[in-house]
Image (cartoon, grey):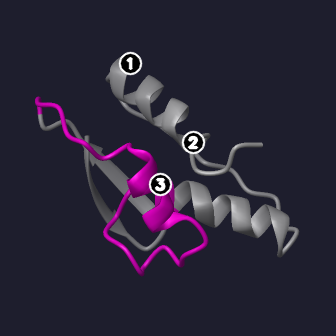
Amino acid sequence: MSFLGTGEVLVAVNPYRQLNIYSNEVVEKYRNRAHYEQPPHIFAIADAAYQAMKYRRIDTCIVISGTSAHTYHDNNFHLFLVHEF
């Protein structure tokens, strides 16, 4: 998956090849950072939602939509890697 983003909207694009974008090192690049400090990524969206819930006490929702079940499943799974509850 590669990502394009504008504001807090993220578009995932299937590059039809394996990319190393879900490692622990990548998670650390996005943890506790503003979403605009790094390139667009599902981890930036996840961290922004987590920070809003934890520190600003704002309810959050992440909507994942698309026609590919694989993309949907992958992104849902990786959302939870940013902050282990």
Q: Is 58 displayed left or right of 73 in the figure?
A: right
| Relative to 40, residue 67 above or below | above
Give the mark nearer the N terminus: 3 vs 1. 3
Whether 33 is among the magenta residues is: yes
As drawn, which residue projects farthest toward the front?
A: 25
Q: Which residue is mark 2?
A: 81
* Kind of residue indicated by mark 3: Val
Residue drawn at 25 percent across, 40 percent down = 1
Q: Which residue is mark 3?
A: 27
Position of residue 6 measured from the top left corner of the image (x, y, whole percent):
36, 70
Mark on residue 69? Answer: 1
Give the mark nearer the N terminus: 2 vs 3. 3
Q: Secondary structure at mark 3?
A: helix
| Relative to 1, residue 33 above or below | below
Residue drawn at 30 percent across, 47 percent down = 21
Q: Secondary structure at mark 2?
A: loop
Residue drawn at 53 percent across, 30 percent down = 77
Label 2–label 3 contact, CB within 8 A: yes
* Kind of residue indicated by mark 2: Leu
Residue drawn at 53 percent across, 33 percent down = 76
Q: Is 31 displayed left or right of 4 in the figure?
A: right
Whether 41 is among the magenta residues is: yes
| Main secondary-structure element of the magenta-colored stretch | loop
